[in-house]
Amino acid sequence: MTRPPLAIDALDRRAERRHEPEWLDDAWQRAQVVVFDPVSEHIDADEEGLHYFDAATAPKGERIYLGGEDPPVFAVWASVPDGLNARWIGGAWDERDLAIAVQAIGMMHWRATYRYHPTTGEELAPIRGGWELVADEGRTVFPRTDPAVIVLIDDGADRVLLAQHRRYGSQSNSTPRQASTRKGRYACIAGFVEPGESAEAAVHREVGEEIGIKLDSLAYVSSQPWPYPRSLMLAYRASADAGQELRLQDDEISDARWFTREEVRRMWIETDSSTPSAVRISIARFLIEDWLEER
């Protein structure tokens, strides 16, 4: 098993430099700069990778130091009228570009959400290279990452259970190939970890809530960041008795069914040309590919 596509450690974050304002000012003058607009969800890039600016050509905007020293790398919040939709990153990109993009998108999503202090209502100002937000009163606001679980459930043999979420539209009578688009896609069960809950308990709860079955076994696989908007995906494999009745959560799940390997391959693998690259670099795709390769 290889690692998930976004489990990349390609840029040294050099967190100690965030506390050195003079170094950061000097670093900006020799920086590589990436540009992302969290409002329009566009990043300055193309199918080949990120577009880098220097201090002289970068647009004006709030900036965050992402890491590195030779060169230092910064992200800037600015309009990107002709950029790439953030969900189409990846593809032929090298790992460094992908790691920088994921970090920039996640950090800028956090900054766009936290414009004002959550308890005082005051406008927040960035310090520490953009990694902390402060106001005259109230506690410092730090970057937030939301843990979420995702699970691929098999029947102990040659099928997996995938569900269709209502927010992607319903195609309950579709073929596996027709169900391969984001609208109507069948995917793994996933959800956020709640306060006071372990990741494993969250898997069992989400499965019970969304499709109404019990798992026989559960095993952790791996994790990766997911910057839409700022999650950490914790991936699991599970097995369940396929004879159980599926009881769908009506307001969340429009359909769920067991799929064979060939059906999953047609749905998830043979449709790459029409699939956003964010799906191809998702940890769901990683789990599915790993299962397909088992035989």
Image: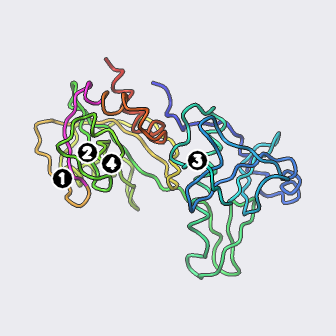
Badge 4 is on which residue? 183
Q: Does the residue at mark 1 contact the one at mark 2 (Cβ under 8 Å)?
A: yes
Badge 2 is on which residue? 163
Q: Quadrant of residue 294?
A: top left
In the depicted view, which residue is nearer to us: 177 or 38?
177
Query: Label 4 to label 3, Cα distance in Å?
Result: 20 Å
Q: What percent of the width, then of the height, locates residue 156? A: 22, 28
What's the residue type where badge 3 is placed?
Answer: Leu
Residue 165 falls within the magenta-colored stretch? no
- Disc nearer the start of the sequence (4/2): 2
Label ID, residue 68: none
Q: Is residue 13 left or right of residue 151?
A: right
* Residue segment shown in magenta: 253-264
- Disc nearer the start of the sequence (1/4): 4
Q: Does the residue at mark 3 contact the one at mark 1 (Cβ under 8 Å)?
A: no
Q: Is residue 43 left or right of residue 167?
A: right
Q: What percent of the width, then of the height, locates residue 241? A: 16, 36
Number of the front mark, 2 or 3: 3
Instruction: From this view, report whether residue 29 is shown above or below residue 239.
Output: below
Query: Label 3 to label 1, Cα distance in Å?
Result: 36 Å
Element assignment for label 4? loop
Element assignment for label 1? loop
Badge 1 is on which residue? 248
What's the residue type where badge 4 is placed?
Answer: Lys
Badge 3 is on which residue? 84
What's the residue type where badge 1 is placed?
Answer: Leu
Q: What percent of the width, then of the height, locates residue 293? A: 36, 21
What's the residue type where badge 2 is placed?
Answer: Ala
Count neighbours of disc 1 (C-alpha within 10 A) and say few if under 14, some if 14 to 19, many if 20 or more.
some
Coloring basis for residues:
rainbow
